[in-house]
Amino acid sequence: MVVEREMKFGKILAIANVLGERVKDKGEIGILPKYMERYGFKPATTFEHIHKDLMQYSHKFGESETSLFDQLTEAVASINEEEFTDKPLRGRYLQAYGAKQHELNQAMGR
């Protein structure tokens, strides 16, 4: 289902963004500013770049970051092979992104 796919990709972006905010150094370009524009057009390929970007900081993962990474892995695993494509997303993914971002920020006291 298209909406479900978009919701899943939105959640992935939110989790990756929060994780990036926690591990990237101040002044570095974050996940959202760096990848948001192309994510909606080529979500699978862009996620591959996001994943590589985040893995450069895996040495900084503490308990909270490992938990976020586990959530990210779980969200990616929820997308079946037929859905994990570069078929452009509709704007609905932004709703899922915003909701998950808010949920994570609340849970982390931000």
Image (cartoon, grey):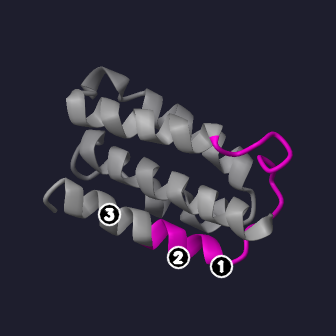
Q: Which residues are magenta?
A: 78-98
Image location (x, y in percent) of residue 103:
32, 63
Secondary structure category for the residue under label 2: helix
Decide whether residue 93 is among the magenta residues.
Answer: yes
Residue nearest the observer in this picture, 15 or 23: 15
Instruction: Point out the tag, 3 or 1, that comes first from the N-terminus.
Output: 1
Residue nearest the observer in this picture, 81 or 91: 81
- What residue do we see at 25% from left, 61% from top? 105
Quadrant for the N terminus in the image: bottom right
Q: Relative to 40, say whether 72 is above or below.
A: above
Instruction: Point out the tag, 3 or 2, that comes first from the N-terminus.
Output: 2
Q: Which residue is mark 1?
A: 91
Pick out the residue farthest to the left. Answer: 109
Secondary structure category for the residue under label 3: helix
Determine the CA span between mark 3 and mark 1: 19 Å
- What residue do we see at 45% from left, 60% from top? 32
Quadrant for the C terminus in the image: bottom left
Comparing marks 2 and 1, which lies closer to the viewer? 2
Determine the CA span between mark 2 and mark 1: 8 Å
Q: Is residue 70 left or right of residue 5?
A: left
Image location (x, y in percent) of residue 92:
63, 77
Q: Residues within 10 Å of mark 2 (few under 14, many from 20)?
A: some
What amino acid is at disc 2?
Gln
What amino acid is at disc 3?
Glu
Q: Which residue is mark 3?
A: 103
What amino acid is at disc 1?
Gly
Instruction: Name the quadrant containing residue 60.
Output: top left
Q: Residues within 10 Å of mark 3 (few under 14, many from 20)?
A: some
| Principal secondary structure, stretch drawn in magenta | loop
Pick out the residue farthest to the top. Answer: 59
Is residue 30 visible to us here?
no
Q: Which residue is mark 2?
A: 95
